[in-house]
Image (cartoon, grey):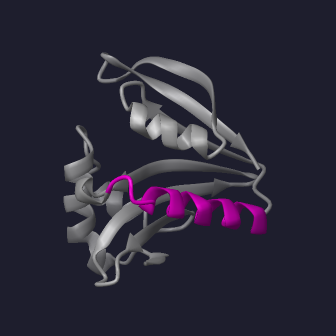
Amino acid sequence: MNIRPAATADMPALAALENACNPAPWSASQLQAALNPPNQLWLRTDAQGEITAMLAWQQLIDEAEIHLLNTAPAQRRQGHAQALLNALFQAASAHGIQRILLEVRAGNTAAQALYCRSGFIECGRRKGYYGGVEDAVLMEKTC
C-alpha cells in the first residue's frame, strides 16, 4: 500500500471513484483544481497501483479543511481512509496545523463513525445544506 499525491494522469480514475462514492460528485474541473496549491489531493493505492481511496484537503494558515474523503466501495473497511487520515495528522503536526475541520452528510453515519474514532467531534450543523434536504454535520479535531 502506498500514499502519494495525485497527478493529472489520475483524473479518469479519480472521476470514476468520485462518481461511485458521492450522490453529488465533484466535476472534472473541481477534481483538477484539487491538484493545485494550496489544495492537496492524496491517493492510497494497492500493491498493483490501483487507487483505493482519495483525500482532498487544504491548509489555511494553522488549520486544515478536509474537502473530500472517498474509498472505493469494494475497498471499504480495510483501513484505506484511516491511512489517509493518519497521513494528514502527521502532516498537520509537521506544518503547525492546530485544528482540522470537515463537513459530512448527516446520513453518512459510517463516515461520521470513522471521524469520531479518529478524534473528531461534532461542532455544528448546516440545516438543509445538501440540496435543501440533508444537513451537513460539521466536525473538528484539535491537533
The region drawn magenta spans: 76-94
Q: Is the N terminus in the top left, top right, bottom left or bottom right quadrant?
A: bottom left
Q: Which residue is at a point 53% across and 49% down the rendered structure image? A: 66
- Look at the magenta stretch and give its main secondary structure: helix
Q: Is residue 55 magenta?
A: no
Q: Which residue is at a point 53% across and 56% down the rendered structure image? A: 57
Residue 30 left/right relative to 121: left
Q: Would you identify the image quadrant in which residue 32 lies?
A: bottom left
Q: Is residue 89 magenta?
A: yes
Q: Does residue 51 sit above or below 108 in this rendering?
A: below
Percent position (x, y) of residue 69? 42, 52
Percent position (x, y) of residue 118? 61, 46
Q: Which residue is at a point 37% across and 75% down the rendered structure image? A: 45
Residue 125 left/right relative to 121: left
* Residue located farthest toward the bottom when viewing the structure as drawn: 48
Front residue of 31 and 54 = 54
Percent position (x, y) of residue 79? 45, 60
Q: Does residue 109 sit above or below 45 in this rendering?
A: above
Residue 42 left/right relative to 85: left
Front residue of 124 and 35 = 124
Residue 24 left/right relative to 105: left
